[in-house]
Amino acid sequence: MTEDARFEDGGEKPLNLGAFDVEDLRVLSALVQDAVLPITEMQWQARRRRFAMLVNRLRREDLPAAERAGRKAERVRAMLIVDHVLHVASQGIDRSDKDTVLQLLSVSFEAQEDGGGEVLLTLAGDGAIRLRVEALEVGLRDVTRPYLAPSGKVPKHPD
């Protein structure tokens, strides 16, 4: 007989996940909701057809355990990487202002008939980054140890 895995059974290990379909991407989107990053921490590598962001993500997977233990929210630096990128467009972002801090709200995919589509990175303040991709492949990998979130709080969103 097998049982479902429980969060409590997992170890404190860095995340290293990939999304190759819409269902996978929904999981990654939930994990990076409310991630913040300086505008200087994103890069399109056109020759490699890769778009990468170094984000400070809220450790949502740890929130239930943190609340039970009376700990404050934690963040961790993570790489969000989109491969097979053919074109990048943005709106509502002043890329010339190097002091801008972006907040990532969601990551979604709009499929097209050719098997490719567009990955949409929705940002707070009506900003967005649209990535035209040949195929859906998005990775999320933690690259530092967790640290106490400066505010110690979890951002709230209206229902």
Image: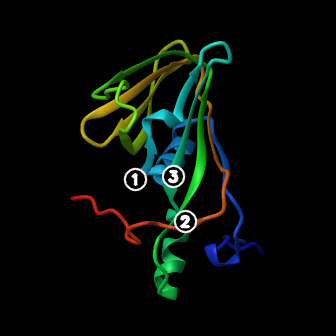
Q: Are marks 3 and 2 in contact (CB under 8 Å)?
A: no
Q: Secondary structure at mark 1?
A: loop
For disc 3, the neighbor class at 10 Å (few under 14, some 14 to 19, many from 20) is many
Q: Which residue is mark 2?
A: 61
Q: How far across and how far down the image is residue 76, in percent?
A: 57, 58
Q: Amino acid at mark 2?
A: Glu
Q: Which residue is mark 1?
A: 34
Distance in Å between CA atoms under marks 1 and 2: 13 Å
Quarter of the figure that contains the C terminus:
bottom left
Q: Which mark is first along the chain, 1 or 3?
A: 1
Q: Secondary structure at mark 3?
A: strand
Most extreme residue toward the bottom is 69
Q: How far across and how far down the image is residue 147, in percent?
A: 56, 67
Q: Are marks 1 and 2 in contact (CB under 8 Å)?
A: no
Which residue appears at 55% of the width and 70% of the height? 62
- In-front residue for pair 84/128: 128
Q: Which residue is mark 3?
A: 56
Q: Nearer the viewer, mark 3 or mark 2?
A: 3
- In-front residue for pair 9/112: 9
Most extreme residue toward the right is 1
Distance in Å between CA atoms under marks 3 and 1: 9 Å
Q: Amino acid at mark 3?
A: Asn
Which residue appears at 38% of the width and 41% of the height? 102
Q: Which mark is first along the chain, 2 or 3?
A: 3
Which residue appears at 33% of the width and 62% of the height? 155
Q: Secondary structure at mark 2?
A: helix
